[in-house]
Image (cartoon, helix red, strand yellow):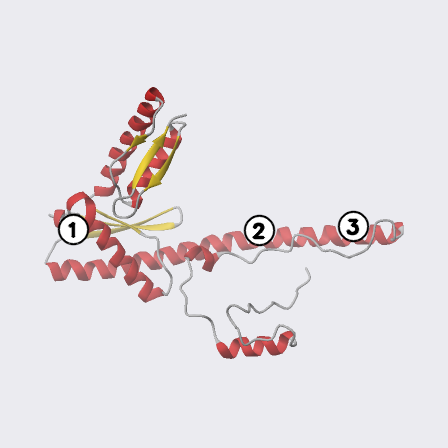
Amino acid sequence: MSTQDPEVDASVYPDVDPDVDPGENADLAGAVGEPDSVLEPEAVLEPEASVAGHDTGDEPGEQDDGAEHDDAEDDSEQDDSEQDDSAAVAPARRAGLAAQLEREGDVAADYLEGLLDIADLDGDIDMDVEGDRALVSIVGGDLGMLVGRDGQVLDALQELTRLAVLRETGVRSRLMLDVDGYRARRREELTDRGRAAAEEARRTRAPVRLAPMSAFERKVVHDAVAAAGLTSESEGEEPNRFVVVLPA
């Protein structure tokens, strides 16, 4: 597989002259350093895209049969090499993601244990992974104050935990925090509400507007409506953003 010198992004390194030799640009880019931005976990773990093809610039019919045969073999070998690289990258990427999510869970658990000690609350920390995000739960004891009205305290606590993970790892986290099974119960309630709204929209052939919800709750409703065969959209501004279920 051929490699090319990477181009320097002018938006990140404005002092770099694109006409200067790539080696000099690389030295200058290294001296400037990386921009102070936080990358999404997916962006951190995403492997570099493989080269889709190679443009020789030759017009059809200019090569003889022998040259075309050699090129075909070279292309075949290149394709096989790229497939081998992809096969090797996939397990490495999964392993890297698992390690990252485990690290996020550990940091979140330490942070939450400190908060429980400060608040003099009893609770155990459970950690799990669902898809591409870490799940952290506080269970046991009287934890209602950590949920609050309509889960508002829980949402705030989740954001604080994500910030703690960001500060410790440098990576913006998408971890989900639950307290005493509140989100699991709420998910079931919202799924039933989404199905009922879809049935109403189908029966009346009119849009159905639901009460304002958090981003997590709206996502659950959208999924339930889609499973019922209809579409939905969010309208309004936070914290009063709500779901509208559209008729077929």
Mark sitting earlier along the chain (2/3): 3
Mark sitting earlier along the chain (2/1): 2
- Which amino acid is tagged 2? Ala
Looking at the image, residue 113 lies above or below residue 152:
below
Instruction: For the N terminus, give its image quadrant.
Output: bottom right
- Mark 2 vs mark 3: in front: 3
Q: Residue at x 15, y 58 (%)?
A: 116
- In x, y percent, where is residue 98? 41, 54
- Which amino acid is tagged 1? Leu
Rendering quarter of residue 173? bottom left
**Residue sitting farthest toward the right:** 64
Residue under circle 1?
Answer: 146
Q: Residue at x 35, y 59 (%)?
A: 103
- In x, y percent, where is residue 177? 26, 50
Instruction: For the C terminus, give its image quadrant.
Output: top left
Residue under circle 3?
Answer: 72
Q: CA distance from mark 1 to mark 3?
A: 64 Å
- Which amino acid is tagged 3? Ala
Q: Is label 2 in a helix, a strand or a loop?
A: helix
Front-most of residues 102 and 56: 56
Tag on residue 87? 2
Looking at the image, residue 194 lies above or below residue 36:
above
Mark sitting earlier along the chain (1/3): 3
